[in-house]
Image (tube, grey):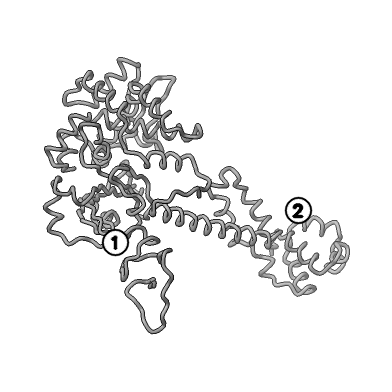
Amino acid sequence: MAENKIFAGPKVRRIRNTLGLTQTAMAEALSISPSYLNLIERNQRPLTVQLLLRLASVYKVDIEDLQGEASGSIRQLREVFADPLLSGELPGDLELVEVAEAAPNVASGILKLYRAYREQASRLSDLADLLASEGRATAIAGARLPMDEVREALEQRANYFDGIDVAAEAFHAALAPGDDLLGALKAWLRKEHGVVVRVLPIHTMPTLRRRFDRHSMRLFLSERLSHHGQLGEVAMEVAQLALNEQIAHELDALALSGSEARRIARFELARYGAHALIMPYDAFFTAAQRARFDLDVLRARFAVSFEQVANRLTTLQRQGQVAIPFFLLEMDNAGHRLRRAGAQGFPQARFGGGCPKLNVHAAFAQPGQILVDCLEMPDGAGFLTLSRTVDGPQAAFGERVRRTAILVGCEASLAKETIYGEAVAALPPVAAGTACRFCERQGCLARAEPPVTRPLGLDEMVAGLSLFDFQ
C-alpha cells in the first residue's frame, strides 16, 4: 500500500519548540535520525503515515492538525496581497503556505491588521463624504490608483473640452462623410496615414477588441464588435491622429501626477474626441433640442448606440450653446460604479448613486428598455432619471454577455424640456436618497446599511420596517 506523504515541517518544528525539545531528543523519541528530522522540518522530506502515527502517539498530536494546509488562512492572505495597495508584492502560493503554516500567529496578525485597515479606510471615506456634503473641505486621502486619480479629475469638472470639440467639428466638416461616416474615416486613415482597417474573426483575436500593428500599419478590429462599436474604435484612432494637439493640451490641463494616469486620461480624451467626431457639436445640439432629448431618436439619427448618445448628451456645455446639464452613471449588476460624467447638474455629495431604489438597478430585469423615474430626495431636491442596459461585444456560445446599465439624469425642474416630461409628471415620485450611509429617511424598505450620522435604535419591544432602525 502506497504511503500518503505529507509535508508539514513547520508544524513539526512548532510542536518541538512548544515542548522545549532539541532535534536530537525528538528524533530519538520518534526513532529517526536527527538529520532526517532536520530535513522534515525544512520540508525536504515528507511525513509518512507511520511517522504521523508515531507523532500522534508520542506527543498526543491531532493528526488532522498535521494533515491540514491552513487553506482558510492561505485564501485570506491571498486576498490581502491582491489589494491594489500591495500591487506587485503578491507572493507565490509557496510563500503564503509557509507563512500560514510556519507562523500562524503572524498570519492571523496580518489578517487582523488588514481588516482594521479596510474598516478605517471605509470610515475615513464616509467621513470625508459627510464633510464634503456640509461644504467643508477635508485633507483625508488614501493611496490612489492612477485610474482613481483620472476619474476624480474628470468627474470634478464639466464633461466638455472645447478645444477637442471645435477641432472635431472642423474635421468632420472637411471630411464631408455623407451617409457613410465609417467608410469615410477608414478612407482618411488609409490616404493620410497609410493605415488599413481590417476586421478579424474571433479565433484570431479571442481576447482583444482592437489592435494596432505599427509595423504593417493595420488596425485590427474584432468581429465581436457591432457596427456602432467598430465606428467608435475607428473614430478613436482618427481622434488620436487628427486631434493629437488638442488632446495633448487638455491632458496637460488635467495636471495628473504620473505617466500611467496620463496614459489612462489620454485614452478617455480620445474617446471623447471620437464621440465629437461621430456627433459634431452644432449638429447634435440642434438635433437634441428639436427631438427634446429623445435618446432613441438621436441614436437612430446619428446611427450610434445608446451608450454613445448618452455620453454625448453630458457634453453639451459650449458657451452660447448650453443644453440641459445631464449627468451619467454606468454600473454593473453587482452595483460597481464604472463611470460617472457630467459634473454640472450632478450633485455628487447628495446623490451618490448608492441608493437601491435607483432604476439603474431595475434596468437589468428589463434589458433594452428605457425606465423613467422622478426621484425625490430627503432634502426635497428632485431628479429625472432614465436607465437602460447596454451590452458589450458579441459573446460566443457559452460566454456570458457583458451587460451594464446606464443612468442619465437631470434636475426635475428641467424635465418638461424633455420628451420624458409628460410621462414622468404622471408618475408618483420615488422616495430615494443618497448612499444608505448618509440617508436619514425613516422606514425605508430598501435600506442596506445604517446611517453613519445616527445611532442605531435597538428596542426589543419595537421593530421598524427597515432592517436598520435608528434614532
Residue at the spot of label 1? 378
Rendered residue at 29%/45% (across/down): 328
Res 322 → quadrant: top left
Decide: is 297 above or below 331. Answer: above
Residue 336: percent from left, percent from top: 38, 52
Q: Is residue 80 left or right of residue 468?
A: right
Q: Is residue 289 left or right of residue 182?
A: left
Q: Amino acid at mark 2?
A: Gln
Res 266 → quadrant: top left
Residue at the spot of label 2? 44
Q: Is residue 261 left or right of residue 187?
A: right
Q: Which quadrant holds the C terminus?
A: bottom left
Q: Amino acid at mark 1?
A: Pro
In space, the residues marked 1 and 2 are separated at their CA atoms by 66 Å
Q: Earlier in the sequence, mark 1 or mark 2?
A: 2
Rendered residue at 31%/18% (across/down): 190
Crowdedness of circle 1 by 10 Å Cα count: few (<14), some, many (20+)?
Answer: some
Residue 170: percent from left, percent from top: 24, 21
